[in-house]
Amino acid sequence: MKEPAQATTAAKSSTKRGNILSIIVILLAFGMIGGVLSAINSTPSCPDELIGSWTTTAQGYDDKVLLITRKGIVFSAGEDAVEGLAVRGLQAMPDESGIFYTITYGTSRSDEQVLSFHYHPRRHTITFNNQSHLVWTRKTVES
């Protein structure tokens, strides 16, 4: 008579273990879904003052355009040379001339690059650290 009781106890133990594993798998799935949603919602967004098509009148830059959208940057050096990349990070720090922006962009974390520039709110222009002699102005604004 002890054998059926042991079989029942073993079956109950196996059922408990299966239920616990199911709960763990469900919790992990919810955690992964939450992580993905959090990553999507935490994607940086460029501020309105930067969104648009930026050009310069400097000699040699006639066909160069920097296009900034909410979630990406497009570099254009003529019709055949266009590269668009996702914004992966954005920092803004007030400085003596306005706001110093650092935008991290790329297709993946291993391919990230950084673009740093000063935005001058009174003149609505930007200048890059390594090209302070070039003044870029916003040509058009996208909504």
Image: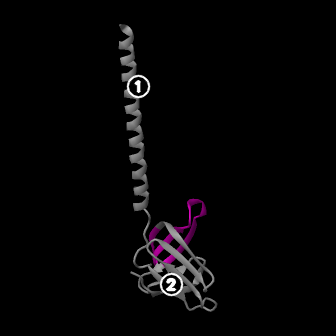
User: Residue 82 at what x, y percent from top left?
Assistant: 59, 79
**Residue bearing mark 2:** 54
- Asked if residue 93 lies left or right of residue 75, the reply is left
Q: Which of marks 1 and 2 is nearer the N terminus?
A: 1
- Asked if residue 83 lies left or right of residue 8, the reply is right
**Residue bearing mark 1:** 14
104 is higher (above) or lower (below) than 60: above
User: The C terminus is located in which quarter?
Assistant: bottom left
Magenta residues (range): 91-118
Q: Residue at x 56, y 60 (%)?
A: 109
Q: Residue furthest top?
A: 1
Task: Provide the major secondary structure of the magenta segment.
Answer: strand
Label 2 CA crowd tier, 10 Å (few <14, some 14–19, many 20+): many
Mark 1 → mark 2, Cα distance in angstroms: 66 Å
Q: Residue at x 42, y 69 (%)?
A: 45
User: Residue 112 at what x, y percent from top left?
Assistant: 58, 64
133 is higher (above) or lower (below) than 89: below
User: Residue 73 at what x, y percent from top left?
Assistant: 52, 75
Q: Which amino acid does label 2 sit on?
A: Trp
110 is higher (above) or lower (below) than 81: above
Q: Residue at x 39, y 77 (%)?
A: 48
The image's colour scheme reads: one colour
